[in-house]
């Protein structure tokens, strides 16, 4: 883990990325499928805005006729006011229901689209971003967007309509007073524009630090046993606390800026209202306008002022959502160098499992100065069992990753049944491959579901048969609920060897024509290894099998052994041939076998 937190983008970079609230326009593709829902919400919103603007008219009539003596007319005005209030309540409830439902639906679609995108990204993508940060974008950023779609935009539109409608009715009530009010508008708009830009920068910085701290926490908690074993808890706490404090400081600056904006806007708006009221009171005294008209104008002025104040606060929320939207769009628009072709070829049936490496050169993007594979040319015939051996870093696991097309070679090509992997859809040829990785992945599910991961449509009987073949049935049967026992996150309830046997059972169940074993028996005891080795030999019959191993005892029976060193093939042959040659393989064999075995 890193010793110091990685800072988020600088303010200069942020301003270059996002200068407009228009970043929210990226949400339109997610909103379009719900036009009817939007239309209903907009209709309810406009109706409630118009109803609220009608209330001051009723108030004016009540005030101006209060001393006239026509009680029946006065009663009618009060009844009309109650009716308007009832309509306003019903319309507001309808607006809330429709807008909230729209927000939840759209955010659910965004989360699914984002997950759909990142789950198919190649390992190249995850060399540049932590999974914790991806999760932060899917959760924290979409929560911000939910707040905007389900609340802020609706409130902003309602206040905008109130602002426009109120200004028009103010002009109709008293053009002179309305003109005085309009003089205040530029003084209010300027701080909104100036401080709003600052808010956008701070909001993005705050979210970046939250994502960074989530990534750090995810990394530490995933490796919690290692953290504790090396007594690294204090350092991990300090690192997480440091990143969290950075996030808090960014949030504090954002809150302070927003508070300044709110203070300036509200003071200017209501100072203007007080000034206008003073002039209006003089007009009433001089009988230029009625008391009812002044009260009507005052109510509209307060409504307009409240709308402006609300818009100033909502603006900062929109700024935060714009930053969150940009971050999600970054994920959705990230280009993966490993892509499916536009016009994919189809593998001929039945699949043979014939694999060829033709002068393949590859360097990991994170280590471009080191060749992981250097001029590899190799043919693996259908049904052949080929083992790859060599020191750590020789390129053995890279061979497996290239066959799965987790990466593409910088030059050369890899073919599957004569077709370049880059010309096939990834899921099309990966269905023909069963993998037992070096670090087996156990999901937070039952033993049965973990094995069923190899072939979702498999029956319980097939699952149990695969477990017996992988020498996993005995320990699974001893679990509290047998095959239905929950194995915990990352298989925390299992030993390393038990995890590996679950992974082997999963590969056996898949029954694919190509079998990839990457250190498949490295965590097994001698007895389990013999049982699993027998199962693997039976499983590999008639299948193309590639075995990566440090323990040479597991590869002695391979049809061919390929010796790798520094990304190059330095020798090939059977176990006996390679031992007799006295090269790298013979040296490795002497280190692992007794003198008697080495002399074979």
Image (cartoon, rainbow, N blue to C red):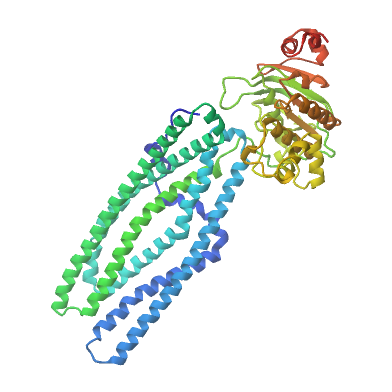
For image coordinates 44% across by 36% down, the residue present is 240
- Residue 89 visible within the image: yes
For image coordinates 55% across by 40% down, the residue present is 334
Q: Looking at the image, which is closer to me, 450 or 101?
A: 450
For image coordinates 14% across by 73% down, the residue present is 282
> Is 100 placed left or right of 494 in the picture?
left
Residue 422 % position (x, y) = 70, 34
Quadrant of the image containing the C terminus = top right
Vertical comparison of 89 with 79: above or below: above
For image coordinates 74% across by 39% down, the residue present is 476
Residue 348 % position (x, y) = 82, 38
Vertical comparison of 524 with 241: above or below: above
Q: How many marks?
A: 0
Q: Looking at the image, which is closer to me, 423 or 494?
A: 494
Residue 559's image quarter?
Answer: top right
Residue 508 % position (x, y) = 79, 36
């Amino acid at each position: 883990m890193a010793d110091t937190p990685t800072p988020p983008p600088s303010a200069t970079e942020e301003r270059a990325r996002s200068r407009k609230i228009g970043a929210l326009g990226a949400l339109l593709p997610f909103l379009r499928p719900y036009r009817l829902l939007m239309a209903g919400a907009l209709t309810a919103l406009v109706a409630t805005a118009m109803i609220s603007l009608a209330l001051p008219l009723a108030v004016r009539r009540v005030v101006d006729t209060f001393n006239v003596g026509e009680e029946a007319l006065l009663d009618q005005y009060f009844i009309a006011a109650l009716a308007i209030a009832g309509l306003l309540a019903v319309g507001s409830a309808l607006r809330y229901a429709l807008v909230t439902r729209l927000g939840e639906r759209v955010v659910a679609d965004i989360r699914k689209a984002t997950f759909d995108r990142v789950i198919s990204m190649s390992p190249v993508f995850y060399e540049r971003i932590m999974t914790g940060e991806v999760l932060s974008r899917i959760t924290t950023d979409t929560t911000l967007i939910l707040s905007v779609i389900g609340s802020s935009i609706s409130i902003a539109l309602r206040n905008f309509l109130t602002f426009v409608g109120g200004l028009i009715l103010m002009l109709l009530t008293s053009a002179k007073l309305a003109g005085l009010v309009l003089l205040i508008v530029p003084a209010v708009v300027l701080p909104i524009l100036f401080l709003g830009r600052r808010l956008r920068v701070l909001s993005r910085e705050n979210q970046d630090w939250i994502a960074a701290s989530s990534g750090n926490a995810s990394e530490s908690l995933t490796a919690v046993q290692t953290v504790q074993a090396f007594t690294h808890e204090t350092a991990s706490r300090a690192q997480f606390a440091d990143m969290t404090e950075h996030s808090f400081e960014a949030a504090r600056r954002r809150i302070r800026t927003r508070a300044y904006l709110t203070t300036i806007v509200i003071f200017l708006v209501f100072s203007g209202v007080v000034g206008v009221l003073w002039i209006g009171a003089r007009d009433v005294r001089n009988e230029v306008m009625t008391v009812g008209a002044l009260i009507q104008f005052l109510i509209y002025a307060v409504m307009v002022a409240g709308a402006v104040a609300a818009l100033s606060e909502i603006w900062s929320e929109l700024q935060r959502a714009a930053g969150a939207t940009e971050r999600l769009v970054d994920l959705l628009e990230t280009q993966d160098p490993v892509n499916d072709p536009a016009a994919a070829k189809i593998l001929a049936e039945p699949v043979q499992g014939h694999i060829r490496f033709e002068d393949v050169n590859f360097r990991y993007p994170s280590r471009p100065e080191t060749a992981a594979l250097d001029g590899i040319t190799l043919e693996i015939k259908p049904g052949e069992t080929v083992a790859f051996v060599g020191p750590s870093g020789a390129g053995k696991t890279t061979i497996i990753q290239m066959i799965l097309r987790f990466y593409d070679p910088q030059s050369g090509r890899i073919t599957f049944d004569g077709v370049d992997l880059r010309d096939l859809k990834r899921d099309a040829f990966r269905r023909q491959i069963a993998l037992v990785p070096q670090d087996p992945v156990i999901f937070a599910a039952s033993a049965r579901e973990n094995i069923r991961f190899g072939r979702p449509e498999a029956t319980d009987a097939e699952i149990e048969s695969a477990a017996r073949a992988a020498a996993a049935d005995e320990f699974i049967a001893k679990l509290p609920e047998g095959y239905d026992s929950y194995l915990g996150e990352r298989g925390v309830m299992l030993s390393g060897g038990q995890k590996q046997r679950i992974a082997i059972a999963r590969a056996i169940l898949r029954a694919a024509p190509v079998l990839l074993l990457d250190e498949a028996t490295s965590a097994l005891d001698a007895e389990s290894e013999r049982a699993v080795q027998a199962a693997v030999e039976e499983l590999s019959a008639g299948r193309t099998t590639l075995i990566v191993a440090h323990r040479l005892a597991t590869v002695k029976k391979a049809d061919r052994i390929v010796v790798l060193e520094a990304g190059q093939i330095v020798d090939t042959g059977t176990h006996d041939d390679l031992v007799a040659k006295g090269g790298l393989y013979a040296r490795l064999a002497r280190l692992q076998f007794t003198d008697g075995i080495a002399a074979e």
